[in-house]
Amino acid sequence: MNCNVLIVDDSPILRTAIRKVVRLAGIEDDRIHEAGNGREALDVLETVWVDLVLLDLNMPVMDGEQFAQEVRKNADLADVAVVVVSTEGNLSRLQRMRDLGVIETLRKPFEPEDLHRLIGKVLGVKK
């Protein structure tokens, strides 16, 4: 599949687990990018076009909400699909994320099949 995915999570273990599911969804490994926080993710977006961001909310340096705010300020990034993959359960915070254009949320811990299905749905893959 010719899509670029950015995994943004401060946990290297979770980034590895998410990367495995993204590969199973048909994304080639060289099209999967990683960042440990929102600031690093913005740096990636300066150099690589990304179709889908899988975003944790609770991270140091720049959290997922701050990242989403910065993305939405940039007209060049307005079409990037953002999906929250987080332990966050605060409904008002999740609503703020939807208001920022987040198209889906997936609560950690998640089943790999649920993330796989969500990636296909967001990227328009028929399964």
Image (cartoon, helix red, strand yellow):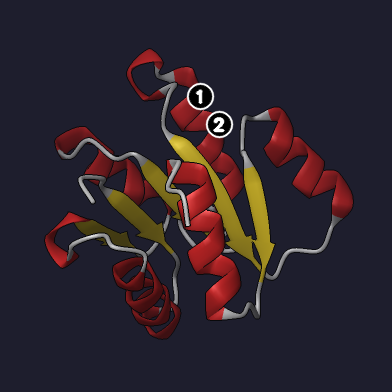
Q: Nearer the viewer, residue 29 or 101?
A: 29
Q: Tell me the SS state at disc 2.
A: helix
Q: In the visual, does 93 lie left or right of 2?
A: right
Q: In the visual, does 89 lie left or right of 67?
A: right
Q: Which residue is pictured at 44% across the width and 70% down the height?
A: 10
**Residue 62 showing in the rendered view:** no
Disc 2 packing (10 Å; few <14; some 14–19; many ≥20): some
Above or below, comparing residue 35 to residue 95 in the picture: below
**Residue 81 showing in the rendered view:** yes
Residue 65's spot in the image, x, y percent? 61, 44
Disc 1 packing (10 Å; few <14; some 14–19; many ≥20): some
Mark identifier at residue 72: 1
Above or below, comparing residue 30 to residue 113 in the picture: above
Q: Amino acid at mark 1?
A: Arg
Q: Nearer the viewer, residue 127 or 77?
A: 127
Mark 2 in CB contact with mark 1 (< 8 angstroms):
yes
Q: Tell me the SS state at disc 1.
A: helix
Q: Which residue is pictured at 45% across the width and 56% down the height?
A: 61
Residue 7's spot in the image, x, y percent? 38, 60
Q: Determine which residue is flagged by label 2.
A: 69
Q: Amino acid at mark 2?
A: Gln
Residue 96's spot in the image, x, y percent? 75, 37
